[in-house]
Image (cartoon, rainbow, N blue to C red):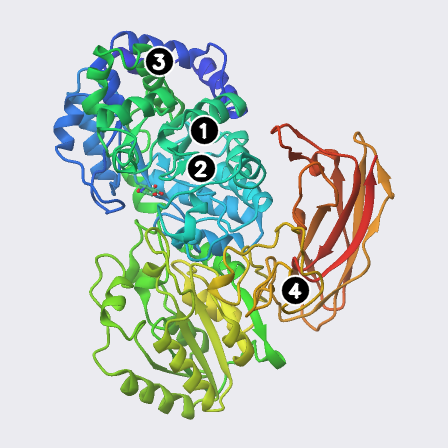
Amino acid sequence: MNHPLYQPIQKNILILISVLMVVSCGKQQPQSRMDKKVDSLMRLMTIEEKIGQLNLPSAGYFKTGEAASSDIGKKIEQGKVGGLFNIKGVANVREMQRIAVEKSRLKIPLLFGMDVIHGYETIFPIPLGLSCSWDMDLIRQTARMAATEASADGINWAYSPMVDIARDARWGRIAEGSGEDPYLGARIAEAMVRGYQGNDLSANNTVMACVKHYALYGAAEAGRDYNTTDMSHVRMYNEYFPPFQAAVNAGVGSVMTSFNEIDGVPATANKWLLSDVLRQQWSFGGLLVSDYTSVSEMVPHGIGDLPTVSARALDAGLDMDMVSEGFLTTLSNSLKEGKITEQQINEACKRVLQAKYKLGLLDDPYRYCQEERAKTEIFTDANRAFSRKVAAQSFVLLKNQNHLLPLKKQGTIALIGPLADAAENMTGTWSVAAHFSKSITVRKGLETATAGKAKIIYAKGSNLYEDAHLEEIATPFGKTLHRDKRSAAELRDEALRMARQADVVVAALGESAEMTGESSSRSDIGIPDTQKELLKALLQTGKPVVLLLFNGRPMTLKWEDENVPAILDVWFGGSETGDAIADVLFGEINPSGKLTTTFPQNVGQVPMYYAQKNTGRPLGDAKWFQKFKSNYLDVSNDPVYPFGYGLSYTDFSYGEVKLSKPEMTASDSITVSIEVTNLGQKEGTEVVQLYLHDVIGSITRPVKELKGFKKVILKAGETQTVHFTLKNKDLFFYKSDLSLGSEPGVFEIFVGGNSRDVKKAEFKLL
Ligand code: NOJ
């Protein structure tokens, strides 16, 4: 390398920089070697080249948005590209990087981004499923492994974690996040950031994380994707911001803005959101990127033409423009017209270059382009074995009447359903780098597990939908339509013939991958009718039926809960789904997943979440309709399955909640203890959950808020005492004036295996 940019750096200086970066890679740093290097580079740059760094086109290998980018190679040569995404394969990445560092005037390397959301080629469960493991170290390790694989293939920037709090099951993107709870969401956000970024962002096996979508995207009205949001600032700070702030505190390198508006201004140009809250209040010093065309989408939002919205976005604090090319094509003119300042362009450019510096790209642009690693570190047997283990931890046992599960490996098992032999659906939404054909189907998993012991017979039983158009929409991108041309009756009859020959029926039903995720909102969140008819018919055979539910959202399962003896929620478990399902169905692994979203009785109840407010007219203990109370005429206020719920093949009992003292001061702490006993014959894992209720506040507080959890393994018959420590900061909340603090008074504490079935105690904060 003969350019001054790539002069070798003294080893001791490198060590010092690494230490500084470990301490805070997203936060403001003092004048450092990085600043000097970036400043000296920027002194060489023209305004056009600086604006070029702010441009982030899509290479188009995957379709993750509507518009397309063009003439990429030429633009890179002209210094009009700062980074590229939607590109796959180390050789392809190397070639684009070569153009940047050999053909552009200043030879500035590119960032390479990708939606590495729940794995790279080795896919883990969808994030909503993964969150049900409640295992922060496991989650961190999935991100670590995803970063290792992605970076081995040339990627240095992952558009993850998605931390949007989501309480409306109609919203398809609820699948991509960690559910409804801010506390759990914040812990998972930290774990993911640590996993992706490791201890050293410049290492060649770590990638820069990008927390998204900032902010409130999960609160889209009516659950319709990209729709308007509107909420109080108190709610934003207490319920929707915490996972973002946790990611920033964990040192996340970048943040992606959301599509929605906030207080009437789209997030991508919302100065209060981007500058006041993110940059100033949270001291975020990393890279701020728009979502896919969220700059140009401010035109249809109705706040101006492309030059206006681009200038507003820059002024608000946005650094990089994904796909819109609003920055590339309009900022130079806006500068001439005095609508923006050179200082604003410099700031944005500096952040892009700082990100490149932190990733080590300014020292070695090919740091992440190691063909050897690409051959040996991706989709390895070890990674797949880990994914299988993780998948089993994400499954939630919703019902298990008379201990129907685990099944024995004997006799004949009829495997029925459109998701039973559907490799293309196993990895779920946002698995762009996956090879679907390599996924383990349920059929394959069950056949392998029972070889020589039991007979698996299979029938599809139904299509996903009876309606061919809906079926087409529900079929993954780029896949041929898997619709079976036979009539619903023919398909069902074949399945019933199989069921009658079997000792037990396993029905793999629910949603396809494409029915969940971006642009996949549903107004009916039940199992589609044709599949439900099949399920009813299977039950009528009198054979025991296990429902294996595939889903990317909480579904309405009231009828299923009342009629099907066993239900295992398997979400979309990733590349090894089928083997992991076999592990749990046959009892090699005892399920321990717990829901991170509330499952409503019907869609009319949503948005539904456990941390609701009491209101002035609470229904209290009444189960059904009461006049002049906050309830419905036609359905109770209860969910089918509450937040935190999930069964095991064993049973747990809880003792009474014990507190180390009845009162505490603000400088004090209190220990909460509870005995948990495994009542059954098998070892099992229980997620013990602690909730708090601030009984009287200056503003109303939720009836319960998660404040701690512990995952414990209990041998058959074993009792363990689980302890939690509560400090004053655990009682903090944002008040009307948005100041953070606690207020003296009585706090109720609830501990249990889900948010509904809890033991209670109380203490006073003096
Ligand atoms: C749009 C999605 O909202 C975002 O999550 C994703 O990272 C980008 N497209 C890039 O694919």
Q: Quadrant of the C terminus?
A: top right
The x, y position of residue 702, in whole percent, is: 65, 47
The amino acid type of the residue labelled 3 equals Val
Question: Is residue 728 something that shows in the picture?
Answer: yes
The x, y position of residue 175, in whole percent, is: 43, 54
Which badge, 1 or 3, comes first in the chain's sequence? 3
Which badge, 1 or 2, comes first in the chain's sequence? 2
The x, y position of residue 283, in whole percent, is: 51, 22
Q: Residue under label 2, please give it.
A: 215
Instruction: Give whichever of 182, 112 is nearer the camera.
Output: 182
Which badge, 4 or 1, comes first in the chain's sequence? 1
Q: Secondary structure at mark 3?
A: helix
Label 1 neighbourhood size at 10 Å, few (<14), some (14-19), many (20+)? Answer: many
Tell whether 688 sits left or right of 762: left
In the image, which is nearer the foreground, mark 2 or mark 4? 2
Residue 686 numbered tag: none
Q: Are marks 3 and 2 in contact (CB under 8 Å)?
A: no
Q: Residue under label 1, please give it.
A: 273
Q: Secondary structure at mark 1?
A: helix
Taking the spot 36% from the left edge, 28% from the top edge, the residue there is 269
Q: Residue under label 3, please give it.
A: 38
The amino acid type of the residue labelled 4 equals Gly
Question: Is residue 109 something that shows in the picture?
Answer: no
Q: Secondary structure at mark 2?
A: loop
Q: Residue under label 4, please give it.
A: 684
Which badge, 3 or 2, comes first in the chain's sequence? 3
Tell whether 313 sits left or right of 195: left
